[in-house]
Image: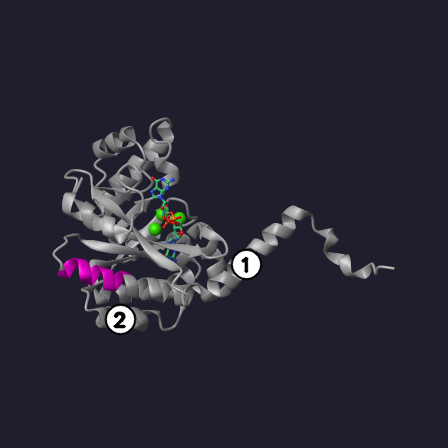
Amino acid sequence: AKRKGRNTYCFFNDEMGSAVSRRLRIENGLRYALKNNELYLCYQPQVESKTGRIKGLEALIRWKSPELGMVPAGEFIPIAEETGIIVEIGKWVLENVCKQNKIWLTNGYNFDSISINISSIQLKQADFLDTVREILDTSGVEPQKIEIEITETAFMESLEENINKLKGLKDMGVKISLDDFGTGYSSLNYLRRLPISTLKIDKSFIDNICDSSSDRDITYGIIQLANKINLNVVAEGVEGKEQVDILKNMNCDIIQGYYFSKPIGSNEVEEVLKRGY
Ligand code: C2E
Ligand code: CA
Ligand code: CA
Ligand code: CA
């Protein structure tokens, strides 16, 4: 007769089982992703609204797993953070963006900077500043050509310590941008204490600026605030012409989103940098 005790996992329904195993497969897959060259970078243009010039590019990581296919960054980054492997991945991103940046500048492509997303886990590392400095030195890229994107929720947990780290970055010459602005719990009063140069208005506000007068008011409020205190302001996730027109009228400096371009590979970036918008 068959023994019963083995099937204890039958508490789980199929859906739970497959969610668990996908998570585990991502977790395992990530351990080899770097070594096996499964990660690569795409870049999304940030366009100056007045001139159509490409002001900058945001580097966004991509993972093509042999087992799982394309895994969205929004799915694997949180798992990489929980397991700590984000520290290694983050270094890889920094190194590769710096290398690419140097190549483009050497070849005469012009842009202000390339933005890199930094996880709070990475920021928390005691050697974070040393790592950044070393990678900048090795690549020979000017610090001004790099911008670090950090979410407000990311640094709120240990505010004083993180402010000091951001100041360290600024002292090196690296620019800092506050990502997903408007979605955190933080108050406005720390804004003047942060050594940032750019606010990125979260896509969730931009999504509804055509239809919702309150989202339009909030967006306009953020733009005016940014202009007033001399910060650059980027509207994220802009998909339509009507949104672009509204944002231009509001004096929003920089527009990023599918309207101009999805994140694209480095070859395509070169075409776009030659051409502009
Ligand atoms: P994020 O930093 O807020 O990046 C913006 C996300 O919105 C990107 O998704 C981008 O592809 C997408 N997006 C841009 N324009 C539009 C648009 O017009 N419409 C729509 N629907 N989406 C748009 P992605 O690349 O999947 O990245 C998701 C998140 O994963 C990022 O959000 C960021 O938090 C994280 N991430 C991506 N790359 C890295 C990285 O190299 N390091 C770290 N630590 N996190 C990263
Ligand atoms: Ca970002
Ligand atoms: Ca964002
Ligand atoms: Ca985000």
Q: Quadrant of the C terminus?
A: top left
Q: Is residue 188 visible?
A: no
Check residue 117 for magenta coloring.
no
N-terminal-most mark, 2 or 1: 1
- In the rendering, which numbered label is found on residue 25? 1
Residue 258 x/y as whole percent: 31, 39
Q: CA distance from mark 2 to mark 1?
A: 34 Å
Question: Image point 56% across, 54% down: which residue?
Answer: 22
Q: Quadrant of residue 150?
A: bottom left
Q: What residue is at 27 percent from the left and 73 percent from the top?
A: 134
> Looking at the image, which residue sits at the far right?
1
* 157 vs 211, nearest the viewer: 211
In magenta, the rendered stretch is 97-106
Q: Nearer the viewer, residue 218 or 274?
A: 274
Coordinates of residue 213 in the picture (x, y in percent): 35, 27
Q: Which residue is mark 2?
A: 133
Q: Secondary structure at mark 2?
A: helix
Left or right of 16, for residue 145: left
Q: Callout 1, which amino acid?
A: Arg
Residue, far left: 108
Residue 275 vertical placement versus 78 (above, below): above
Please name whichever residue, 231 or 63, is drawn nearer the observer in this view of the structure.
Answer: 63
Which mark is on residue 202? none
The crowd level at tag 2 (other Cα within 10 Å; few <14, some 14-19, many 20+) is some
Identified at 24% across, 52% down, the residue is: 267
Q: Residues within 10 Å of mark 1 (few under 14, many from 20)?
A: some
- Contact? badges 2 and 1 (CB < 8 Å): no
Q: Main secondary structure of the magenta part?
A: helix
Three-letter amino acid code at disc 2? Arg
**Residue 65 at least partly seen:** yes
Could you say whether the residue bearing mark 1 is in a helix, strand or loop?
Answer: helix
Quarter of the N terminus within the rendering: bottom right
